[in-house]
Amino acid sequence: MKNQSLSKPEVINEMKVDYFPPISRRKFLSASGLASLGLMLKFSPLKAAVTPNRPYRKFEDLMRNKFTWDKVARGTHGTNCAGNCAFNVFVKDGIVWREEQQGDYESTDDTPDYGPRGCQKGLRHAKYMYGNQRVLYPMKRVGKRGEGKWERVSWEQALTEIADKFIDVVEKDGPESISWGSGTQMSVKIASYAALARLVNITGVTVPEFYSGVGDLPTGVYTTLGKVYVGDTMSAIYKSNCVLVWMSNPAVTRIPDAHFFWEAKYNGTKVISISPEFTPTAMHSSLWVNPKPGTDAALAMGMVHTIIKENLVNHEYIKEQSDLPFLVRTDNKKFLRKEDTSIVSTLAVEDNIFYLWDKKTNQPVIAPGTGLTDPPPGRDRRKFDTIDLGDIDPALEGRWTMSTLDGDVEVTTVYELLKDEAENFTPEKASEITGVSPEVIRQIARDFAQAQPAMIYAGYAACKWVHGDLLQRAFVLLLSLTGNIGPEGSGLQISNSPKVRGLMAFAFNGMGPATRMISATNWDYEQGNMKELTKNVYGEELAEEWDAKYQESIKEDWFPQYGKKGWKMGFFAGNNGANWRASGNKWRKDAFEKLESIVAIVPDMGVTAHYADYVLPVAHHYERADIMLQARTPYVQILDAAVPPIGESKDDFTIVHDFAKILEKRAKKRHMKVIRDNVDGKSVRRDFKRAHQQFTMDGKVKDVKDVIQFIINTTPGIPKMSFEELAAKGKVRVEGSDKTYYDKDAPYHSEIMESVNEKRPYETLTSRQQFYIDHDWFIEYGEQLPTHKEPLSIEGYPLRMMMGHARHGIHSMWRDDPLMLTLQRGEPDIYVNPDDAKTRGVKDGDKLRIFNSGGEFFAMAHISAGIQPGMTFMYHGWDPMMFKDQQNFSAVISTSGLIKPTSMAGDYGHLGYKVLAYAPNQTYKDFTCDFEKATHG
Amino acid sequence: MDKSRTLFARSAAYALFSNLAHSPHEDYIIFSDLENVIQEIEQVLPFEVDFSSIINETNKVTDNNWKNIVQSYSALFEVGDDGPPIPIRESANDSLAFKKEEITRYYDYFGYTVSENRKWESDHLSIELEFIHFLCQGERESEDALSFQLAQKDFIDRHLILWLASVHYKMEQLDAHPFWMAIFSALFTFIQKDLNWLKNQTNELKEAI
């Protein structure tokens, strides 16, 4: 498309079209320029008007013609709801008019089928994609940052200026001073993410990892099981006899899948909803249990106490699968290790060989499967070792004296220590903490333990508490004690993730991994000086103590530290980074707005784009091709371009590709030197003069369909076929999905099933489900075992604010849709308890000021008896642009500096920095606030 | 009144405004003899209009100020924090989104097809104006002129006039650049008068039938 913005417009005198009768034209025009003007069709192919088939007399005549479709494309919404709903997309005259659920899903075994899948957001997208919020052209800021003044510029201009700035920063401060933050909006679209992953691998910029960065990383699960991804398909719910829906609200957040809960309930399953507020899920459940916010771990431990006390424990299961029978020294609270017992073992550093007490021989014995070294490259030790106990009958209870290098010491089992810990949470004591009746605690413990199989369906909310890892460890403990990890219909259902080897193969092809990836939590802590915030809000003592541990972890090289020269340039692609961050007001002021250059790559306007220097338009879901894998359903889902990208938007691949091309061009023009870089000890040569050549694999990769085909061809579990074949089907069942859980052939993680069914060692220090962590820091903080710790509060502010995913949006996507807003209150609202409102003189609909020492924001009062006294609740995703002063709830979520020490622990078997497995979460819950009727705003 | 000349003047006026309301970032054309063109249109139109402000503003365009004019168009109609302040596509106005289907039905009924790269914005003001221009040509060529004339009246009445008033009002509120203010003010006046004229004409024609 020609862009003439930089010079005076073209002046023409020539005639363009001529199909009026010449005589009348000449008679009238007398050779004026009117001829060229009056006879020109600019937006339409040259075509004379035709007499309609039927005379037109009134507009109703238009409706007599049937509205037909030019084509029906397959598609879905490449957003991060994990729904992966197959849609048919109806196109006429180059416009998407409507969509409809594809619907033809199969079932698994005797469970209900997966379809039709979809929700009101997806069914609204055909309208939303043409909405006024859409970014259609590259934009450059012309006013002050955040002033909202923009200039439309060409792609060439935008990418050239961005590339020049990119090179400036790299030459001065190195690539790690640039962040390219992606988000789930992109990562779920595997080909797009692969393209970005390749570019960041080539350029060496820092990637703030968003899984922990948004507080979604189940570190407690990883701590216990050595794996994060342990979820099954949604149909597994139907196989369960008791489902604890804990800190989750699937009736709202999993609309296409919620039917599995209600069908299971109809089939006799007990569905118990556990949440402090009365949710739409609770409404449909068999029982609603409402602990005080942040006391869930006490409830779980109360259940643990009942299960142990009432002998509901599956002893055989925990003897084999868990570390509960492992011996622990009572003098120093450490596991008894082989290196404790002989100087030879000490010299051999046999610190991962552990002991059981064999009841048959009344002797300590080495626990099978322990003492394993790291596998040599290419060899999976899990295939060769076993945790099979053989003839050993481990004692779960008892105390013994053993001779060690330190002399005689008393040892006991983890199970004994657990019993002691559980005594702190008898149902009566747990009731005092949680507000839940002791009898209810006992009853749900019995229901859960006796159901067989039983499962815990938990969202990511637990990860968002500072001590959420303890809660997750308690979740796994409940499951393990009752033998509920392994059988179909059991387990902890939080997440699974595709093993898309093709993605990494594409990203690293030709140069190997050279990517800087760090938790966005760490990145924000350092770049936003969040220690200062903790000091101001939670006190100096806590800030100093936790920061000391943070610095020690960095010093010990347990966690990496990037961006030491500061953060200079930020790319935000596939995320609305200035929306969802905790302590967003401080982050924006002290980190984001101080950036030298901000580039937002977005389909729709939002607060991140608002503050950017350049906004680049991305194609929406029906305007692009991609491939998606989401473990909730056993299908690979395609996105196919129903229509071309609207305006001047482009798909993510094309943007990254074009940027690489211009980066290469500018690097050549500027005679840029090769960068001798080092990533985590690995030397890397980065030559931006070859950026595009490298990115395209010497020209072999031309468009996103090439990437999709690469991924199909190289990822196990995806049926092999061409993109076109896949696009014609829309969705295809993945391999290894005959059961409600995935087997080894599936493109999803299934290692836990192997550990349970085939007795393979777990990827933990103890090779077991590990409930006891004897890392010094865990002992120092009393977190060796699952337990409950009070959530942090801000002194002087009595109300705990809870949040959850919204029904009418997926994070900030569709949150501003006019139709969706009519289904809510039309503006951000906050739920408050009637008594709390009354004592503050607040009526429903009043504008509230919500505040604490971290900041304030304004929202409409939504008074609801479903909210406990002492708490408030707000659905999330509302963009700051929808609030007064562009401050949303993140202004009071002062938690960005709360990185608990144990989350940075390392040098301990499986614990230590591991991308997408062990990193500190951004937390969002450990704060309190207050509200009052707003007198201004 | 020479109906043929009247029709051609109206047709030319719609083509002119279609071009002038179009994004200057793209194939924007200003004719060397715009003044003559406009004067001829003014003389032949069956109602009185004054397009002199367009001529005045066009004459002020220089290489130096053109970029500013282009930017001001973008800032009004193409880019902005909550989308552009004034949607230039009819369906981007929330209250009018439901009318998009009717626009497509009009185009289909009369065989007007939008070029491939413009289909997504088939309800852009420029394209809707061009459609009226297209209908004018059809009126001239077709044996069923009444169909085309009635369609012009209805399309303006049911679409253009509804939101052009709001476009014009918002431009005034936002103190739009004089170049664009001149064009859109003239357009708004022209369309109102043309609609009235069309209503009278079609009533007469209907009665004659």
Image (cartoon, coloured by chain):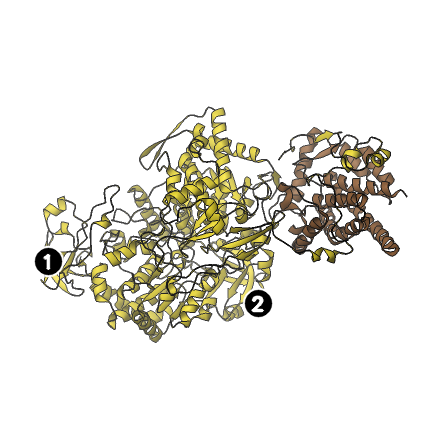
**Quarter of the C terminus of chain A within the rendering:** bottom right
Chain B tint as drawn: brown
Residue A185 in view (yes/no):
no
Of A666 and A678, which appears nearest the observer?
A: A666
* Residue B139 appears left or right of A250: right
For badge 1, the amino acid type reads Met
Kindly identify which numbered label has been placed on residue B31.
none
The answer for which chain carries disc 1 is A
Q: Quadrant of residue B17?
A: top right
Do discs 2 and 1 share a chain? Answer: yes
Chain A tint as drawn: yellow
Question: Which class describes the residues within 10 Å of circle 2: few (<14), some (14-19), or many (20+)?
Answer: some
Judge whether A446 appears above or below A619 on screen. Answer: below
Report if the CB atoms under discs 2 and 1 are less than 8 Å apart. Answer: no
Kindly identify which numbered label has been placed on residue A402.
1
Q: Residue at 56% across / 54% down in the picture? A: A125
Q: Residue at 36% across / 34% down in the picture? A: A511
**Quarter of the N terminus of chain A within the rendering:** top right
Q: Which tag, 2 or 1, sits closer to the chain's start? A: 1
Q: Measuring from the top left, give residue A315's x and y in whole percent.
A: 21, 66
The answer for which chain carries disc 2 is A
Q: Measuring from the top left, give residue A476's x and y in whole percent.
A: 31, 61
Q: Helix or strand or loop: what does disc 1 sit on?
A: strand
For badge 2, the amino acid type reads Asp
Judge whether A869 appears above or below B14 on screen. Answer: below
Q: Measuring from the top left, give residue A335's x and y in whole percent.
A: 19, 55
Kindly identify which numbered label has been placed on residue A844.
2
Question: Which class describes the residues within 10 Å of circle 1: few (<14), some (14-19), or many (20+)?
Answer: some
Of A873 and A535, which appears nearest the observer?
A: A873
Most distant residue in the bottom direction:
A439
Q: CA distance from mark 2 to mark 1?
A: 67 Å
